Amino acid sequence: MPIEQRGVDTVPDAERTSGPRDLVSILLGSNLCLGVIIFGWLPPSFGLGWWASVSSIVAGTVVGTVFTAPLALVSLRTATNLSTSSGAQFGVRGRLVGSVVGLLLALGYTALTVWIGGDVMVGVLGRLFGLPADGASYAVVYTLLAGATVAGAVYGYRVLLAMSRVLSVGMTALLALGVIAYAPHFTTDALPGTGGYLLGGFWPTWCLATVAAGLSGPIAFITLLGDYTRYISPARHTSRTVLHATWLGLIAGLLVPQLFGTFTAFGARAALDYAGPLVSASPTWYLVPLLLAASAGSVGNAGLMLYSMGLDLDAILPRASRARATCAVAVVATACVFVGHYAWNAQSAMTSFVLLLTAIGTPWAVITLIGFVRCRGMYDADALQVFNRRSRGGTYWFRAGWNIPAVISWAVGAGVGLLAVSLPSYEGPLLSLTGGVDCSFLLSGAVGGLAYVLLTTKAAADTESATAPEMTSRV
């Protein structure tokens, strides 16, 4: 299969041959990995029992999916990725806000997937063949995983789609075996090793788990969904069908692995660490399936994240090819893996990462969705590519390529979110107004969206009346 040459340029309709089933396959298959499974461990590690952990993950995932899934329709209409599509709201240069947000999201999740997958692989190989758990072993395993991930990401969308189809079946079977393997020691009681509720009370801790474990899953896809739907043709598939496929793919692709992570956390008594107890509690017969899950699953998920990173860097540096951009960000992601292994506590690092990026990413997504509703899904696809062509002008040029009100709205929303976040090592000053409950997601999205509406209502009305016929003819 040839290497994909296309970056963030507009995909011709003749190449848009994927469908809703492919979207479900890629969202399901790519998420059945330890990098997603481990998020199911977070609620038990916060001191919640089984039912409280499950309810927090389900509630957060459903709410996040309802909010995130409509973003898939943007790239269905623009035939390019979401960061580039956001130029309709932020300006053809201002869309760099989305590229940076997407780059950070994908970078963090790629590093996390390789990190956790590598740790489990070293543990399993230690039990099977006596591999020492030293620096050299981790370095070799991390490098091998990173190399396989780069290969899939460089070859591009078609290879990753084929891989996801296989993983959606194979990983489901491996997880089903895992339920049998860890069932004998499963308990619904809170794990005593956690020392009680992380935030001192049930509801603050439950809300933290809802955001950190449940809501963070769909939010991770706010810039990724367009990477897949840009290959679906609106001439052959309706928006409703694509939206339903996105809902199904996100809910199944996130709940199945995360609830497996919750189940195994209780079955393995994984209170303050996940990878070590997961391997130690595994029966011997499940070690080989666990090794396959840690290796193949990690490559599938990290490959998609790395592919998205390559597109985002390609959007930032249009003269760089997608393949070169992918290799460049792979080096950075691998470096983050080593830093994470040697310098960070897994629970604190994961919690801080998802809460911070949720706070800064949500207002960008809200503004992009408001713009989609305002223009009724009609975009000037050619004008979105102005920055990539190193040219000027067009419908979305605004002021030197920046829509200042949109950028200010995003910055204000992100700033409020960061002031309302509750991290293991930092608590925002606005927490006193929310009773100590982390509402950074709600506040950042609400403030950013409201600011955008207030600052741009008149301009949007003028632009819509002047350009709607032209945009309709160009999409």
Image (cartoon, rainbow, N blue to C red):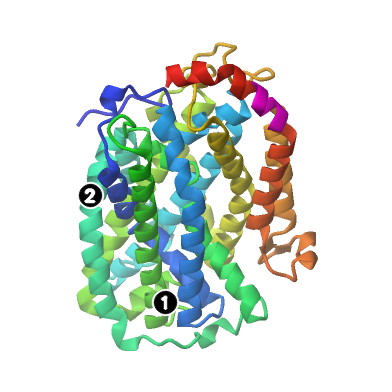
How many circles with numbers are drawn on the protein? 2
Q: Position of residue 465 (x, y in %)?
A: 60, 21
Q: Residues within 10 Å of mark 2 (few under 14, many from 20)?
A: some
> Which residue position holds label 1?
265
Precedes in sequence: disc 1 or disc 2 = 2
Asked if 338 appears above or below 454 in the picture, the reply is below
Asked if 392 appears above or below 246 in the picture, the reply is above
Q: Residue at 48% x, 27% y: name it.
A: 378
Secondary structure predominantly adopted by residues drawn in magenta: helix
Asked if 103 appears above or below 198 in the picture, the reply is above
Evaluate whether residue 344 shows in this view. Answer: no
Q: Residue at 67% x, 50% y: name it.
A: 446
- SS for callout 1: helix
Residue 458 lies in the magenta-colored region: yes
Closer to us: 266 or 77? 77
* Amino acid of disc 2: Arg
Q: For the magenta stretch, what is the residue range? A: 457-462
Q: Position of residue 120 (x, y in %)?
A: 36, 65
> Which residue position holds label 2?
165
Residue 227 lies in the magenta-colored region: no
Q: Is 274 positioned to the left or the right of 408 in the image?
A: left
Closer to us: 104 or 400? 400
Q: Position of residue 255 (x, y in %)?
A: 39, 64
Give the CA separation, mark 1 to mark 2.
27 Å
Which quadrant of the view contains residue 258?
A: bottom left
